[in-house]
Image (cartoon, rainbow, N blue to C red):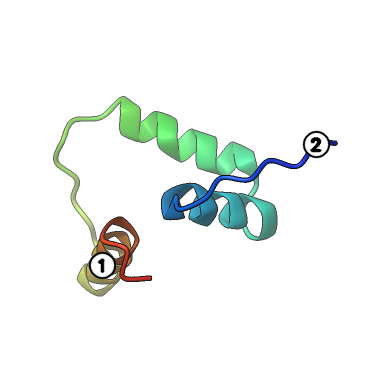
Amino acid sequence: MEECYIKNNKIVTFLYLLMRDELPCGVVERIVQELENTGKNYFFSNGYLADYAYEIAERLLTNKV
């Protein structure tokens, strides 16, 4: 199998590691499809978890990781 290297894309790297080590690809795909089919407003039942998810997203998107 040919290896693929993608440099400087933390979102791709995060998703790759998540699917390789933690979650089945089908679970990730189901979540992506749910997000594609919903509106722009999301409601979270756990504010602390939502804040942490936001913090992680900001770190990944602003190259603070």
Label 1 sits on what residue type?
Answer: Asn
The single residue placed furthest to the left in the displayed view is 41
Determine which quarter of the picture holds residue 52.
Answer: bottom left
- Residue 17, relative to residue 42: is it above or below? below
Tell me the residue at 44%/55% (across/down): 10
Extreme residue in the right direction: 1
Of 36 and 9, nearer the camera is 9
Pick the quarter of the image with the C terminus: bottom left
The residue drawn where x is 62% and y is 41% is: 25
- Image vertical order of residue 4 relative to residue 34, above or below: below
Instruction: Locate residue 41, reporting x and y percent.
Output: 14, 41
| Residue behind mark 1 | 46
The correct choice, above or below, for 38 with respect to 56 in the image is: above
Q: Residue furthest top?
A: 37
Marking on residue 2 = 2
**Alpha carbon separation for disc pair 1 and 2:** 41 Å
Q: How many other residues sit within 10 Å of disc 1, few (<14), some (14-19) or many (≥20)?
A: few
- Give the secondary structure at mark 1: loop
Viewer-closest of 49 and 58: 58
Residue 9: image location, x then y, percent: 44, 50
